Image (cartoon, rainbow, N blue to C red):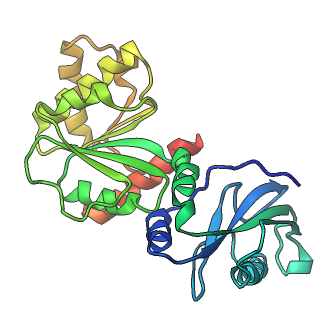
Amino acid sequence: MAVEPQPLVGGDLPAVLHRLEAGETAVLVAVAQTQGSAPRERGAWMAVFAHDAWGTIGGGQLEWQAMAVARRLLADPCAAMTEWRCPVGPSLGQCCGGVVHLRAWRVGAADVSSLRALWQPALLPLALFGGGHVGRALVRALVPLPFAVRWIDSRDGIFPADVPPQVQVEHSEPVQRAVADLPPGSRVLVMSFSHAEDLDIVAACLERCRRQDDLPFIGLIGSRTKWAAFRHRLEARGFGPAELDRVTCPIGLPGIRGKEPAVIAASVVAQLLLDVSGTR
């Protein structure tokens, strides 16, 4: 079975690449194709090192058997890429009932660049305006998920020193100027320290949507009262009802009422994932 390279999906990329760059060898096991019901999607992976593993292809006997194959490849420096077909049913003690096609190959420091290229296309652009408590909680929640985060604030010295590799920090003054340079398809979260800044950022997003229509999600932190006030001010700037309906405020899933930063972050991330999957 010939398998073309596919983007890999998952959140352990930085740790795995760091270990490979440090000289360790691993066997990467990836889901190349699925038929019917399967525990993970095409592109899911796990990296098997000598004493541990990162990522998952679905758990259970499927993963246990794949790890055994990976250990054999890891013990053989001359081993080539291996591909095989796994029915996920009673023979494996799993009830998915579909078929998973797996491939496994050895990777080391020389493969880091190609692996980074395989992972990168799976990351979705996301712009986060605001480096406060909720912004920091959101960055922590987004790290294991397939988002490339552009974290923007107008204040100096607001970002922590230990920013994850898939997060790009940016100082922008005025802050709304950064909207013009966002990658197409960016999802935008607005939660600056200032209502005035929030308003300008949202307005810049709506102006961009008039020109390019390439920001699929614009989320604004706040209450319904805040959005009612913002809506009135944005109407005064010339935005119509259909344009204003593109803004989601309050952000987060309805029914999750906690106001702690971590709770808000979990609710917003769940909403983003629903939006990405098209079930919002």
Which residue occupies the extreme bottom position in the image? 51
Q: Residue 26: percent from the left, percent from the top?
A: 61, 75
Relative placement, left or right, of 79 versus 153 is right
Q: Which residue appears farthest toward the top when viewing the image?
A: 238
Q: Nearer the viewer, residue 277 or 230?
A: 277
Answer with the quarter of the image where residue 105 lies: bottom right
User: Can you see residue 222?
Assistant: no
Q: Position of residue 20 (x, y in %)?
A: 50, 71
Q: Residue at x 78, y 79 (%)?
A: 69
Q: Residue at x 86, y 62 (%)?
A: 98
Q: Residue furthest right?
A: 91
Q: Which of the 4 image quarters holds residue 51? A: bottom right
Q: Indicate left or right for 113 with 95 as reference.
A: left
| 170 vs 260, nearest the viewer | 170
> Percent from the top left, x then y, of residue 246?
40, 27
**Is residue 248 or residue 104 the one in the foreground?**
104
- Specify the quadrant that holds the N terminus: bottom right
Residue at 36%, 48% (x, y): give it. 149
